[in-house]
Amino acid sequence: MFLSVATTHRPATDLGFLLHKHPDRLHETELAFGKAWLFYPEATEERCEAALLLDVDPIGLVRGKGQAEGLLDQYVNDRPYAASSFLSVALNKMLRTAMTGISKERQELAESALPLEAVVTPLPMHGGEALVRDLFEPLGWTADLAPIENVGDGAGKWRYGHLKLTGTGRLSGLLNHLYVLIPVLDDAKHYWVGEAEIDKLLSKGEGWLENHPAKDLIVRRYLRNRGALARIALERLAPETAGQSLSPEVRDAPEEALEVPIRLNDLRMDAVVEAIRATGGAVIADLGCGEGKLLYRLVRERWVHKLFGLDPAMRELEWAAKRLKLNEFGGPPEGRVTLLHGSLTYRDSRWAEADVAVLVEVIEHLDDDRLPLIERIVFGETAPKSVIVTTPNAEYNALFPKLAPGNFRHPDHRFEWSRAQFEAWADNIGKIYGYAAAFSGIGAVDAVLGAPTQMAVFTR
């Protein structure tokens, strides 16, 4: 993975003083996960460019070197190649002093707005080109993003891009923007995120993050969607909001706001509850339960004996607990509902007793190269009697007047399938794991484009 910064401020070679790295030398540093080099492809009076090249050791990571999360489950993924938190760590290690804005020889220049250019490649585009622009352009940078060939999904959605930023600003500001926003666009981190990470975020975000229009998204993604940590960070950014929270009943996600006119969320919940009832199952695991909307519907059904809700976001589980009144007067009996903080990418025996597993609008939030792992965990290793999956029908998107052609219903969707693609995926699961799938649509059916949501009920 590659990152470069350049300036045309004359004399441009003063960039070496700001970066504390001499242009005539090759600078090298060892990292827990590989090796980084900083060198100058160009160093003239007119233009000077410094490039950071990072080589990640994927085999060493899998064997335990660096204890990095995200590589422990398989050897082959994009972690050694795509710009990510690995690159941010290398940037901070190699250019830590430059990021503070301190330059003993050129302090006045370090505090000045310079003509700057930065290149990052390959950059993950989790959220698409629009999100890249929404993150960098409010900070004064012009973003020129070109898709990288042969890594799209075949439907015009590119997963990686070549990003070029241009603009005028302090070099330390640009470096801090890149440090924070590269992991945000990757929407993942290779290491455990705890409260110490809040201090890093607020330090690198000082002076710009508190006023950024995408502040909430930046904080949430930087902290790996750990809701409790994100809440603490946001309260520290804006102390006057401390103690405030949104009612679970009024939090509309972009997808839900889009679908409000057709009451699709209500129709989806109704259809899923009836599908669960038809399986005869009484112990249900809601995988990716979010705020607990489905659990709230199911807990009132007498035929349901026990419920599990699994989600990777602690804040979502907190909202679910409030919605369900867990451990409160009027809530369900102890042990009837269990909320679990965890991920579908790891086998989890805590919900293994479920005879029905449900994934409501979950799979489209996962990278398609991660799906085989989820399939193995759910259908292969845990293997409940029934599995119910719902996902958007991409064909129906043409009927949403506020949805631009080619866009997904939610900025966090990694894909949206046609009916044929969904059925092909389900048929393949049946062949591998011995499930039969029955398909149906949810919502008003268009004669040509089908229903807005598609559902498969798998039976082992």
Image (cartoon, grey):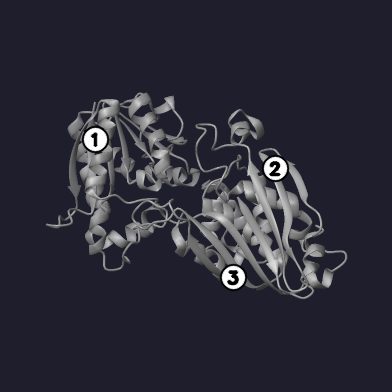
Q: Is residue 101 left or right of residue 280?
A: right
Q: Distance of mark 2 from mark 1, alpha carbons?
A: 44 Å
- The amino acid at mark 2 is Lys
Residue that protrudes farthest toward the left in the picture: 447
Q: Secondary structure at mark 1?
A: helix
Query: Is residue 66 visible in this depiction of the protein?
Result: yes
Number of the label disc, if any, that sits on residue 35: 2
Residue 281 rendering spot, x and y as whole percentages: 24, 28
- The amino acid at mark 1 is Asp
Q: In the image, which is nearer the foreground, mark 2 or mark 3?
A: 2
**Looking at the rendering, which quadrant does residue 310 occupy?**
top left
Label 2 environment density (alpha carbons within 10 Å; few <14, some 14–19, many ≥20):
some
Q: Distance of mark 2 from mark 3, alpha carbons?
A: 29 Å
Q: Is residue 313 left or right of residue 289?
A: right
Answer above or below: position of 290 versus 158: above
Q: In the image, which is nearer the foreground, mark 2 or mark 1?
A: 2
Number of the label disc, if any, that sits on residue 427: 1
Q: Secondary structure at mark 2?
A: strand
**Looking at the rendering, which quadrant does residue 446 occupy?**
bottom left
Q: Distance of mark 1 from mark 3, alpha carbons?
A: 46 Å
Query: Is residue 234 visible in this depiction of the protein?
Result: no
Q: Are marks 2 and 1 in contact (CB under 8 Å)?
A: no
Q: Residue drawn at (29%, 27%), measured in percent from left and top?
A: 432
Residue 348 rendering spot, x and y as whole percentages: 44, 28
> What residue does disc 3 label?
141
- The amino acid at mark 3 is Trp
Q: Camera-side residue: 254 or 139?
A: 139
